[in-house]
Image (cartoon, coloured by chain):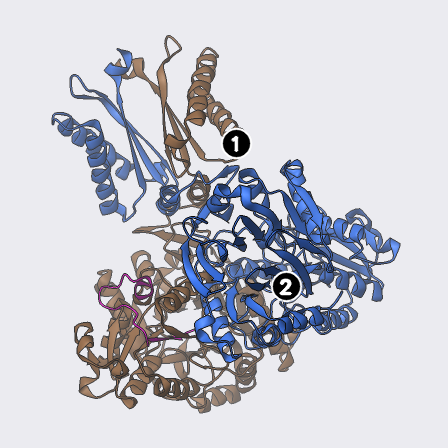
Chain colours: A brown, B blue
Amino acid sequence: MNNKVLKPNELGIFALGGLGEIGKNTYCLQFNDEIIIIDAGIKFPENYLLGIDYVIPDYQYIIDNQDKIKGLFITHGHEDHIGGIPFLLKQVKIPKIYAGNLAMGIIRNKLEEHRLLKSTEFVTYSASDIFTFKHMRISFFRTNHSIPDSFGIAIETPVGIICHTGDFKFDFTPIGPITDFAKIATLGEKGVLCLLSDSTNSELPVFTMSERRVSDSMNEIFRRINGRVIVATFASNIHRVQQIVEASVATNRKVAVFGRSMESTLKVGLELGYIKCPKDTFISGGELKFIDDNRVTILCTGSQGEPLAALSRIANGTHRQISIIPGDTVIFSSSPIPGNATSIDNTINKLFRAGAEVITNSPLTDTHTSGHAGQEELKLMLQLMKPKYFMPIHGEYRMQKIHGQLGAQCGINPDNIYVLDNGQVLAFSNKGVRIAGEVPSGVIFIDGSGIGDIGNVVIRDRKILSNDGLLAVVINVNLKTKEVLKSPNIISRGFIYLKDSQELVKEILSGTTDFMSKILKSKKSIIQIKNELTDYLTNLVYDKIQRKPMIIPVIMNVKDQEA
Amino acid sequence: MNNKVLKPNELGIFALGGLGEIGKNTYCLQFNDEIIIIDAGIKFPENYLLGIDYVIPDYQYIIDNQDKIKGLFITHGHEDHIGGIPFLLKQVKIPKIYAGNLAMGIIRNKLEEHRLLKSTEFVTYSASDIFTFKHMRISFFRTNHSIPDSFGIAIETPVGIICHTGDFKFDFTPIGPITDFAKIATLGEKGVLCLLSDSTNSELPVFTMSERRVSDSMNEIFRRINGRVIVATFASNIHRVQQIVEASVATNRKVAVFGRSMESTLKVGLELGYIKCPKDTFISGGELKFIDDNRVTILCTGSQGEPLAALSRIANGTHRQISIIPGDTVIFSSSPIPGNATSIDNTINKLFRAGAEVITNSPLTDTHTSGHAGQEELKLMLQLMKPKYFMPIHGEYRMQKIHGQLGAQCGINPDNIYVLDNGQVLAFSNKGVRIAGEVPSGVIFIDGSGIGDIGNVVIRDRKILSNDGLLAVVINVNLKTKEVLKSPNIISRGFIYLKDSQELVKEILSGTTDFMSKILKSKKSIIQIKNELTDYLTNLVYDKIQRKPMIIPVIMNVKDQEA
């Protein structure tokens, strides 16, 4: 890119994955021969990406420029900021990963699973660390977010200071350490050239509720409940887990934990000291039966209605150890991620049917609060940082656009506000700023163990198959004598019950035989014949039952095979 | 059922489709040899029902008892109350359909499309009509809802009065005629035996905002906007359409209408007098270019992000006549139906990208209000009707359950509150009430023109196909000589690009040949061989790339075919 996009002594800022609806949270800064990467996130695919497990950004630019990479800096340990690391390390040599304490714990676990622990070096940073490279000097400022050890990153460069907030909210009464206001204000006083700030909740005209309010509210709710308390929350929200543990201890409850990610959160949390409680607080599922219901908390995964999570199994009556009993109260200490509403609703219906009371987050219950800044906090960040240039990051396009409008309200020159697409390079120099061009960007699908071996044709085929299934017609022909040998075989999946549709089957069989007998006598190629047979059968089936299964013609030249 | 479930002179009330998460809004009342049906709704399938167009209730009970049916009474013209009618008429002889003015217009259009106009008689009722049968006497009370001509139904029976609210809200300042409070209160004074009341919004601790507030708000917004106004709303909400037309007229705008359902709403609305405006208010798409932007309103479908609707095409830049220009403001006069959030978000992102301002409903904008009663209105209905027994209807299980709790708060004996499953029969007699048993109930899937020819196996196969596609292996064998003839052919769809996966293809081919050569020598049946080959290939593929396509083995016995 240096030769093509950036000029010498220009600082380039660009996202490989920055817009939520496309990639996820992978930002790069480049000055001459130095590149640093901030975060390497993963995106969970939207429904229409059938069978895709994850979506990652296209790493082509940093693959091509890996000799320049100084390190990957992680702001915090959420999947949309660290989930891409294994896929990145498989493709790019990253000399060092820099991360806070908790994020590093999670990353190491993840890389151990992928057997990638040896492919990079790990540097755990603390709030006061500074890392100096030839052109860039990296420091950190603590923020508050829905996972401990969240940081913003300040990068001093030859053209000025760039600040990247990571995900944040302002919480004046957090659980855990508070935002480093002084450091942020000092950066603002020194002069911030460009601020990159989290746009996720920029549409909400609020100052996000403090995590402390959830804590108070959960304590009140726990006191009111006489039977068992079953709480589902995001496993990574360790502060929340700590509050649930505290509310349990305060109401004389033992805590049983279910769900793989919740168990591993607890393990990491206890090891690193984020979870603190009396020694005998936790019990196993097997011990539950020896304890009175009003002395039990069940802490579990499944707040998003994920089909295999602990709470969903409990609701379905398929959990190995827990079933709902009268007097149970289920608390959702969470809010629905868009797209999950239906699954969550179904889980709640099942819990009601099983006889549980269900408490979800609402202005009346306050069992959850967001980890992202609302409009008032975004303005506070803008006023503290007072950047000359402003680049809204994270979230979807409309959120970045609205965040940009907030920036203008806070006095930033509208011409200095840049909502960029992934790949677009914003270049700063002593002369000013320009959009310097584009680096390769896009999305790569991960399905099973493959990286990028699935493309749009495969997705399109899955869509067709999912709508109407398939109809394969196997025809034995003799290409020399131009004869159809015997009646074709048909095979269907996801289409209709063939047994119940004898008439349709008969028409397909005789239609195919007639069609093939005629067309074999033409001079058409086997590919042409297949295409025309497909069209013929598509129309025949659609006429009969208004469905469009995928037609798969299999033409076997028997004579040829034996030859 | 009379012989099996109901005793003589018992009044049975039951839903074939009553719970939203299962069927949709098809209630029956039976007294001896008389059955009336209230509404015949359709449900749009959840995402997991791949390829299914609609879900209807199982009509078996009324098929078996069609000689007793006196009529189908429709409360209002929404799809979840009338959409099942064509499928019902194809299976059951319904002597008469009774509906209000607008609902009847919509039903007749629908049946004309299905060529079913001659299969029943149509009786358009007005608020003052009374229909008398041997055991039942049917009258109506006007309600307010998000479509004009919405009614509740009162059924006088030998055991007492049953009231069914239909969908409703209380709106003290509606557009159009107001709820008939006097009639409802009079029914309450006479004594209501059992109330069936709409639970859709029972979770919301509110008194739903008046439609008039939306009208005021839209007028304010229209005045503020200088460029074109593009409004998307539910086509069936004719009062809303009228307000948008009025706001346009008040701000000197002409209205162009896009989207098939919006056009047909307008046609019906103008014909029946629900839409009133100066003669030259509407213009065609072609005329838009002759009018200043600030004199244009574009009224369209697509408020739910439906991929083929007018607004989605406009957002995508694929609309035949309209593309977004600077200064355009898009108003969503709607709220997201759960499950549509992601599509709507995508549409909004695209509109932002194209340069439009976007206004969605929020407490700051009030561009939409619900048509369903919140908790305070539900309590008002309960206090007016003062029923002895209470049966929450509509909505999902948890909503009915919460509605039941509201009933208890309003003084109904908790033992007299019944949240029933579809098919469960509540029977009233002079001696009291009992759950008398169950009639057949369940869901029927509609895909294309088939009714109920798709079952769970087909859906399961579609799910597998949608996740990982299919891999068909065609093997020619000679069963007599127990030989594999030539190398197998493989065909895949929605799996991987075979061309890019030569190594995997090679392993599948040689693995299959080896496997078949061995197993042919065993005494296993062809079915056993197919099953074992499927298992073998499933494992082979999963080991290599962690995916599980549907394996389709096609074993062709060539010798046999020629014989």
Q: Chain of mark 1?
A: A
Could you say which is closer to the camera, residue A76 or residue B13? B13
**Residue A542 - label:** 1
How crowded pointer 2 is (Cα within 10 Å; few <14, some 14-19, many 20+) is rated as many
Q: Is residue A548 left or right of residue A476?
A: right
Judging from the image, mark 2 belongs to the subunit labelled B
In the image, residue B23 lies at what x, y percent? 48, 53
Amino acid bearing label 1 = Tyr
Boundaries of the magenta span: A312-334
Q: Pointer 2: what residue?
A: B334
Q: Is residue A322 magenta?
A: yes
Q: Kindly indicate the quadrant of the structure image that contains residue B299.
A: bottom right
Residue placed most toward the observer, A189 or B168: B168
The lab-note entry on whether marks 2 and 1 share a chain reads no
Tell me the residue at 64%/82% (across/down). A411
Q: Quadrant of the C terminus of chain B?
A: top left
Q: Report x, y in % for residue B108.
A: 69, 44
Q: Is residue A489 magenta?
A: no
Q: Residue at x 28, y 36 (%)?
A: B505
Q: Is residue A298 above or below residue A188?
A: above
